[in-house]
Image (cartoon, rainbow, N blue to C red):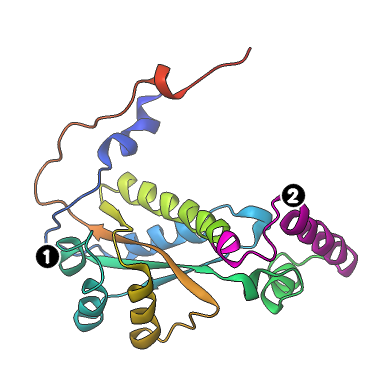
Amino acid sequence: MNETVLTPFLFRHASKDFDPDRKIPEDQFLTILEAGRLAPSSFGFEPWKFLIVQNPALRAELHRHTWGGKKQIPNCSHLVVYLAHKRPRLLPESDYIQSSMREVLQLPDDIIALKTDYYGNFLRSDFGMIDNEMRLFEWSCRQAYIALANMMTAAAMMEIDSCALEGFVEADLNTAVKQHLQVDTDQFGVACMCAFGYRVRPPRPKARHSMENVVRWYD
């Protein structure tokens, strides 16, 4: 196995304690954000937003509803809230999907029409979720987690620590982001959060199932 490739994965761990006095240099955090922006997504629709919450008072509002980030939220260098798009933005004819194809992917009109039909059939028939708001949101969250993984890996490559946070009361946290971060929760919901910074102490040895337990080959 290629140890150079694996080095950041061996470095990364779910850091519970961050050094509040160490801040990530701006250029390095912008690199982490760019790794998220460049993440792959289904159909290339990027159904996510990243909110960077640095204001201590705003962090405190999020902290109230987060039981899994009691130490991380106040002390981390950077806190990211990952929003996933909800059903109104994900429907094939929505302004977001249509503008993504036209302005971001820069597809010609005939390809847009074909992709609209193809995407609509995926939502309607292949996965049967076009009318199921929760399933569609969960699919959107899965895309956001790809961006999250990209960002945590990019951080680890620069020896920056991270901890994904989903230990929160979902309804209350969404209410908080609506009230304090001005998020339209009819259009977006919180998928997860992630704290970035620098560890206070070395982590425990990494523990994982064996390769034999998680991989099955079909030759």
Check disc 1 and report its element: helix, strand or loop: loop
Q: What is the count of numbered marks?
A: 2
Closer to the camera: disc 2 or disc 1? 2
Task: Identify which amino acid the numbered label 2 is placed on.
Answer: Asp
- Which residue, given by chain and number where applicable, does mark 2 sit on? 126
- Which residue, given by chain and number where applicable, does mark 1 sit on? 20
- The answer to whether one can see residue 1 in this image is no
Answer with the quarter of the image where residue 211 lies: top left
Q: Left or right of 131: which side holds 183?
A: left
Task: Identify which amino acid the numbered label 1 is placed on.
Answer: Pro
Question: Is 111 part of what is drawn in magenta?
Answer: yes
Whole-percent x and y of residue 31?
40, 59
Question: Can you name the residue that lies furthest to the top here?
Answer: 219
Question: Can you name the residue that lies furthest to the front here?
Answer: 132
What residue is shown at x 25% (from left), y 43% (from top)?
Answer: 13
Q: Which residues are magenta?
A: 108-137
